Amino acid sequence: MNSTCKDCMLNKHINNYPEDAPEELVREYRETLVRITDQTGAVPTGPEVFYEVKALRKRLFGEGEMDYAQIKRHFNALMLEIEPELEKRVEASADPLKSAVQYAMMGNFIDLRALCSTR
């Protein structure tokens, strides 16, 4: 993982714990999270780090990361419904490649797990 990905992963999770979590578990969570995202040696991938964070949350708080599968299915279904219209717009565009890339960028935006955010 590059440093931007590491920073995003850390920022996304550092304050993402149950509000009623005991302070000692929050401290352990944050310290372990920093170690997980700052691994040296074998360079972990984003998904590997994500699963380590999920296991950490499960161990400390009894919960994992939000299940995005249902949300992803919902948005994929919505996009499939409008796919014919988007295809027409791309084909009718003065610059079809640019339009296609812009629509692809919008599709990446709805990848909710990938969004770099905090609570």
Image (tube, rainbow, N blue to C red):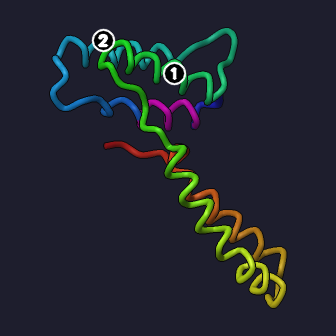
On screen, residue 80 above or below 33: below
Residue at image x 32%, y 14%?
60
Instruction: Quickly name the residue at label 1.
Output: 37
Q: Position of residue 74 (x, y in %)?
A: 54, 58
Q: Secondary structure at mark 2?
A: helix
Q: Position of residue 22 (x, y in %)?
A: 16, 17
Distance from label 1 to label 2 (Cα)? 14 Å
On screen, residue 15 above or below 40: below
Q: Position of residue 66 (x, y in %)?
A: 42, 37
The N terminus lies in quadrant = top right
Q: Secondary structure at mark 1?
A: helix
Q: Quadrant of residue 32?
A: top left
For the residues bearing labels 1 and 2, Cβ distance under 8 angstroms: no
Q: Is residue 8 magenta?
A: yes
The C terminus lies in quadrant = top left
On screen, residue 75 above or below 111: below
Mark 2: amino acid: Glu
Mark closer to the chain start, 1 or 2: 2
26 or 67, which lies in front? Answer: 67
Residue at image x 46%, y 17%?
55
Q: Residues within 10 Å of mark 2 (few under 14, many from 20)?
A: few
For the stretch drawn in magenta, the main secondary structure is helix
Q: Quadrant of residue 5?
A: top right
11 or 64, which lies in front? Answer: 64
Q: Quadrant of residue 11?
A: top left
Instruction: Quickly name the residue at label 2.
Output: 28
On screen, residue 117 above or below 42: below
Q: Residues within 10 Å of mark 1 (few under 14, many from 20)?
A: many
Q: Position of residue 41 (x, y in %)?
A: 67, 9
- Which region of the structure is painted magenta? 5-12
Residue at image x 61%, y 22%?
48
